[in-house]
Image: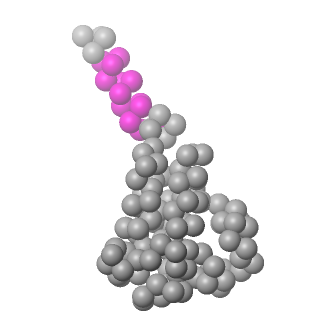
Amino acid sequence: MPHLIKTILIIITAVTSNTAIARDCSSSDNVVINRVSEILNISKSQIVLGNNFSEQSPAGDALDIVEIIMAIEDNLNIEINDQELDARIGSTSVTELPHKLTIKTLQQFTKEACVRA
């Protein structure tokens, strides 16, 4: 019986510990699409990966992007570094994000953040 209790405690620790949880980074592209679809209130089939947020229909603004990133971080239990993202796309202010950030770039950046986490 003590062996069973020890095994159960090991499993509980593994499930509750962030370092022990294996992230499924292969789903990160879908998480991005799902959050964009949900927050911009558009169907997944309407999302154009190569378009920036201002070119989506309906267009996404800087506040939408912040909300999408926060939702992605929560879903994948990761942190997306805003400064690194800005540097990647050449953005100098949050108001430029909708015009410079594409869905595909956000997917790539999210996958990289997931792998690093």
Residue 10 percent across, percent down from the top left:
39, 24
Kindly tell me whether residue 39 is visible in this rendering: no
Residue 68 placement, left or right of 38 = right
In the rendered image, residue 110 lying in the magenta stretch gets the answer no
Which residue sits furthest bottom? 58
Q: Residue at x 55, y 80 (%)?
A: 52
Nearer-the-camera pick, 116 or 56: 56
Residue 45 percent across, percent down from the top left:
33, 75
From which residue to which does the magenta span run?
5-17
Colour option used = one colour
Nearer-the-camera pick, 102 or 31: 102
Q: Main secondary structure of the magenta part?
A: helix
Residue 36 placement, left or right of 115 = left
Q: Residue at x 42, y 88 (%)?
A: 57
Count of numbered marks? 0
Residue 92 percent across, percent down from the top left:
75, 78
Residue 37 placement, left or right of 94 = left
Q: Residue at x 44, y 65 (%)?
A: 32
Q: Residue at x 40, y 53 (%)?
A: 27
Question: Looking at the rendering, in which quadrant would you find the N terminus?
Answer: top left
Kindly tell me whether residue 106 is visible in this rendering: yes
From this view, report whether residue 44 is shown above or below residue 25.
Answer: below
Residue 13 percent across, percent down from the top left:
41, 30
From this view, report whether residue 81 is shown above or below residue 36.
Answer: above
Residue 31 placement, left or right of 97 = left
From this view, report whether residue 117 is shown above or below residue 52.
Answer: above
